[in-house]
Amino acid sequence: MAAEATAKKAKKPTPKPTHPKYSVMIAAALNSLKERNGSSRQAILKYILANYKVGETTTGVRLKLALRKGVADGSLKQIKGTGAAGSFKLAKAEPAAATGTPKKRGRPAGKKAATPAKKPGRPAGKKPAAKKPTGKKPGRPAGKKNAKKPGRPAKK
């Protein structure tokens, strides 16, 4: 009897979604919107709902998660705001040559270091004139500090 109960509760395989991953949809939205200062979450959501077959109820939540994940892994760049709020752009892909072997720094082995030439600058004896402090500080005018306003008597 127990074997029959577990057979009935066996999960049905979930159908494959008809849309691509959210990261791909976000990239497509950012490419097509082409906003100079990045695109907002609302604009991206509007584009995804218009162009893909997704459920309207869960798309907002999944989009927020995908935007946060994209910023965290570096595929998206957040221009304004924090979290899933603000404007987003696609991060520029670095060229593959930059990640190759690093160049050696330093001077070639056969040459000696040249003596550093003196840089023309200020004469050693002169220093810039220091600013002289003014007599008064900006703020409250001189006079009564805590004068009580006439009005209601104090509570007892």
Image (cartoon, rainbow, N blue to C red):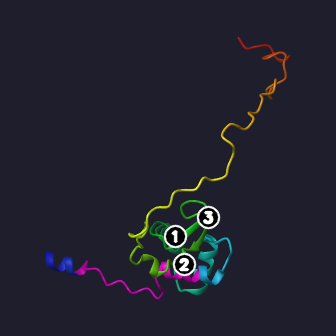
Instruction: Write down the quadrant of residue 133 in the picture.
Output: top right
Residue that mark 1 sits on: 67
Between marks 3 and 2, how big is the CA–CA gap? 14 Å
Please report whichever mark, 2 or 1, sits nearer to the chain's N-terminal start: 2
Residue at 52% over, 75% down? 59
The amino acid on which the numbered mark 3 sits, given as a three-letter code, is Gly
Report if residue 101 lies within the magenta region: no
Given residues 124 and 42, the one toward you in this image is 124
Label 2 residue SS: helix
Label 1: few (<14), some or many (≥20) within 10 Å? many
Which is more N-terminal, label 2 or label 3?
Answer: 2
Q: Residue at x 59, y 86 (%)?
A: 51
On the rendered structure, is 48 left or right of 12?
A: right
In the image, the segment drawn in magenta is 8-29
Q: Give the number of the disc on residue 26.
A: 2
C-alpha gap between disc 2 and disc 1: 8 Å
Image location (x, y in percent) of residue 13: 32, 84
